[in-house]
């Protein structure tokens, strides 16, 4: 019996799939010279395909001399493919990789960022990253030296997936100072918040499951939760953070697996949930038994306004899973972050972590632990905060001075960016093309939406440029925006190479 398996999602035509498989069966001897092949109609019925698909396949095999049809008698294998002969070179058609993809890769959302940054003279208001000059290189180098000398033989060996124990202990006591009671066993060290989100998806989100996302939100979360298999429910963000009326309505009708939120200095809007709203959100999660993933990555970057307890610190019911990392306070390239969750959840996340990459680099964890143990991290955070506050103020002043009166923007109390609303007729994706020609780049707001993107929004990060460069960048941007408002040119379509995808 001839068993063929056709992949209807593949881009390879069905008849060619039949040809390849029959040829392969003859090659490996599963079909021998003289064996009879099923009749056209019979094979078409078995495979659930059109008869012409089978006729085309047989015609191709016959043209290759591998089968012969005899009217009235049937179709028979007549030869073995020549490629089996040892001397003949095998001319294989190239693999069509696209046809093999499991459809889970989604869009590339990060690397164009790194390319766009290459032009040195461009002022970047696009990325939520520190200026390279901010890195405390000498102090960090001394920490790396010290841990290598003290513990190098262990640090270069394979370790536990839960993380470097001294770092877990130190994080546990730092978290307790901010009101979070997390024993080391309730902590998992990851390669940053991005991986924490991915682990969470692996553990909790099955095919067809829904996850609540703020709209707009961090594009890295979109890339994880809007991928194939999972579905998302978008809840709008108001100027006070996630719209809890909409969330309440959603939770009364649907059963999402998780609620993902950045309640403090949200990316991209910079909004913060106030105390009342935090309690309300927790109440909703508890009532509907839907865990919250609290992305707390920005809370240390506070410039003014009250210090609010995290959702995790307010959580008496164990409904919040909190994620954090060292990326925003200083070192995005280190790739060290953590998850705080109930012990049983950590156990599952640990397994997922092992499946992904066994564990985060011990050397990096030990170095950042050493950096923090000597009070250098706190010192660095103070320095970064001071600088970013000045940069934020420089941006707000420049916006007043150079942007048209019709534009509006937020005044974030922390975080890394100002969220700007342009007059409705302007499209920020197009403004970016002209801005880049004038040596300044930013993140168009459309990249942060899971649905119904608002085209006139822009995220302006103030962390990567000094105050004078911020002023210059905003001045150039203001000029581009004003010119587009007055000329009201017909928008020209973006060439592919001109689009910049977001963004951290
Ligand atoms: N969450 C948010 C809200 C972010 O803005 C970012 C990075 N910009 C991340 C997570 C990713 O952080 P990490 O570098 O720790 O993976």
Image (cartoon, grey):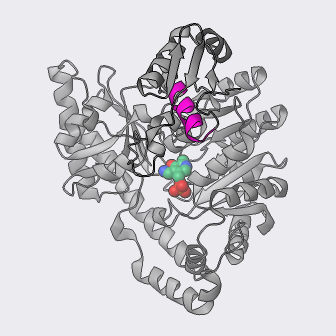
Residue under the image location 44 percent in, 43 percent down: 83
Quarter of the view holding residue 2: top right
Seen from the viewer's position, the closer of residues 234 and 400 is: 234
- The x, y position of residue 207, in whole percent, is 70, 32
Residue under the image location 78 percent in, 36 percent down: 290
Seen from the viewer's position, the closer of residues 473 and 273 is: 473
Residue under the image location 38 percent in, 56 percent down: 463
Q: Main secondary structure of the magenta part?
A: helix
Residue 23 magenta: yes
Quadrant including the N terminus: top right
Q: Is residue 3 above or below residue 374?
A: above
Residue under the image location 61 percent in, 57 percent down: 324
Furthest residue in direction bottom, as rendered: 149
- The x, y position of residue 497, in whole percent, is 26, 37
Q: Is residue 473 above or below residue 365?
A: above
| Residue 269 in the figure: left or right of residue 286 | left
Q: Which residues are magenta?
A: 18-29
Count of labels shown? Answer: 0
| Residue 436 in the figure: left or right of residue 264 | left
Residue 269 magenta: no
Q: Is residue 304 above or below residue 452?
A: below
Q: Is residue 246 above or below residue 418?
A: above
- The x, y position of residue 423, in whole percent, is 32, 24
- The x, y position of residue 481, in whole percent, is 22, 32
Can residue 268 be seen here?
yes
| Residue 408 in the figure: left or right of residue 74 | left
Can residue 238 be seen here?
no
Seen from the viewer's position, the closer of residues 274 and 496 is: 496
């Amino acid at each position: 019996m001839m068993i063929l398996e056709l992949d209807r999602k593949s881009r390879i035509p069905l008849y060619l799939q039949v040809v390849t498989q029959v040829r392969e069966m003859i090659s490996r001897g599963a079909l021998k010279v003289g064996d009879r092949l099923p009749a056209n109609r019979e094979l078409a019925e078995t495979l659930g395909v059109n008869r012409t698909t089978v006729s085309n396949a047989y015609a191709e095999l016959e043209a290759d001399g591998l089968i012969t049809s005899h009217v009235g008698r049937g179709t028979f294998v007549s030869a073995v493919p020549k490629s089996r002969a040892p001397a003949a070179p095998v001319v294989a058609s190239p693999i069509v990789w696209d046809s093999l993809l499991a459809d889970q890769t989604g869009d590339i959302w990060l690397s164009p960022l790194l390319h766009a940054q290459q032009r040195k003279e461009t002022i970047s208001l696009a990325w939520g990253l520190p200026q390279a000059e901010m890195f405390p290189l000498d102090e960090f180098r001394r920490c790396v030296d010290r841990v290598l000398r003290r513990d190098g033989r262990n640090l270069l060996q394979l370790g536990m997936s839960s993380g470097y124990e001294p770092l877990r202990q130190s994080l546990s006591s730092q978290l307790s100072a901010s009101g979070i009671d997390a024993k080391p066993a309730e902590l998992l060290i990851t390669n940053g918040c991005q991986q924490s989100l991915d682990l969470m998806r692996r553990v909790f989100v099955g095919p067809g499951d829904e996850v609540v996302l703020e709209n707009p939100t961090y594009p890295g979360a979109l890339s994880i939760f809007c991928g194939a298999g999972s579905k998302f429910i978008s809840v709008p963000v108001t100027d006070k953070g996630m719209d809890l009326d909409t969330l309440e309505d959603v939770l009364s009708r649907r059963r999402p697996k998780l609620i993902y939120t950045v309640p403090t200095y949200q990316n991209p809007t910079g909004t913060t949930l106030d105390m009342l709203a935090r309690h309300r959100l927790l109440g909703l999660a508890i009532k509907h038994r839907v865990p919250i993933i609290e992305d707390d990555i920005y809370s240390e970057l506070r410039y003014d306004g009250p210090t609010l307890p995290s959702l995790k610190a307010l959580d008496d019911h164990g409904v919040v899973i909190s994620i954090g990392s060292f990326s925003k306070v200083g070192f995005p390239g280190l790739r060290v972050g953590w998850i705080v969750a109930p012990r049983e959840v950590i156990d599952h996340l640990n397994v997922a972590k092992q499946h992904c990459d066994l564990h985060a680099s011990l050397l990096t964890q030990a170095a950042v632990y050493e950096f923090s143990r000597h009070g250098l991290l706190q010192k660095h955070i103070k320095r970064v905060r001071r600088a970013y506050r000045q940069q934020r103020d420089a941006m707000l002043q420049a916006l007043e001075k150079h942007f048209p009166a019709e534009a509006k923007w937020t005044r974030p109390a922390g975080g890394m960016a100002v969220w700007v609303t342009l007059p409705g007729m302007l499209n920020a994706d197009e403004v970016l093309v002209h801005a880049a020609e004038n040596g300044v780049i930013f993140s168009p707001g459309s990249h942060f939406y899971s649905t119904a993107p608002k085209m006139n929004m822009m995220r302006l990060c103030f962390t990567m440029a000094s105050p004078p460069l911020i002023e210059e960048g905003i001045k150039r941007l203001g000029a581009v925006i004003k010119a587009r408002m007055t000329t009201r040119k017909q928008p020209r379509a973006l060439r592919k190479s001109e689009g910049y995808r977001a963004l951290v």
